[in-house]
Image (cartoon, rainbow, N blue to C red):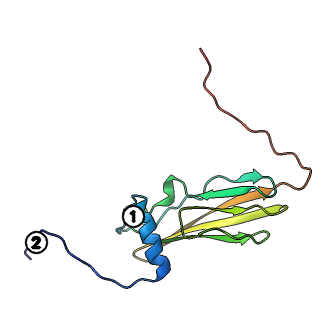
Amino acid sequence: MKQRRGHFVVRCRVSAGAWITALAMLVAGCPIGGGRAAPAPDAGEDRTVEPGAKVLLVGGPGTMDVDGGVLSLEWTQIGGPAVDIFLPFLPSTWFLAPEEGTLTFQFTIEDLHGRTGSDTVVVRVLASGEDAPPAIIDAPDSP
């Protein structure tokens, strides 16, 4: 087969959600391709927040498919008092913490070959009057 160089236009039909996800990944500089390994998402560390806080859900370094072939990704709530997740099809998103409770979120990635990977993160919302755990700050020693 003879190889050709140049610019080619490829047309395909995808759902609006998949198109928006692909566009977001391209804008973020993430490759869209495909390979043999299933995605290995990273939903981040469990945490404790105060009621009413804006809580960020951030896909970590493992957010991408190891082969670089993400078709879709989604944050879904799988436990706790219901909250609205802002733009759940982006790698990083947010929600407002309810009055109290323990919420569990699942971050799922599907690659171009239909393989999926998921990770979960737990967000504990402090009850009214409860003290937050102490923060640990790792700062370099001053000279």
Label placed on residue 4: 2
Q: Residue at x 75, y 55 (%)?
A: 53
Q: Tag count in the figure?
A: 2
For the residue marked with disc 2, what is the amino acid? Answer: Arg
Instruction: Depth check: give the residue in front, 60 or 26.
Output: 26
Q: Which mark is residue 60?
A: none
Relative to residue 107, is residue 115 drawn left or right? left
Query: CB under 8 Å between callouts 1 and 2?
Result: no
Q: Quadrant of the N terminus?
A: bottom left
For the point 79% across and 62% down, which residue is it?
Answer: 102
Spot occupied by residue 92 in the image (x, y as percentages of width and height): 57, 60
User: How far across and down, in percent of the image, does residue 85 sit?
Assistant: 66, 68
Residue shown at 37% from the left, 67% from the top = 32
Displayed quadrant of residue 103 = bottom right
Using residue 130 as the reference point, say whether residue 7 is left or right of it.
left
**Dot label at residue 26:** 1
Q: Residue furthest right?
A: 129
Cα–Cα span, label 1 and label 2: 25 Å
User: Observer-nearest residue: 27 or 40?
Assistant: 27
Point out the image quarter for the C terminus. Answer: top right
Q: Residues within 10 Å of mark 2 (few under 14, many from 20)?
A: few
What amino acid does circle 1 point to? Answer: Leu
Above-or-below relation of 41 to 138:
below
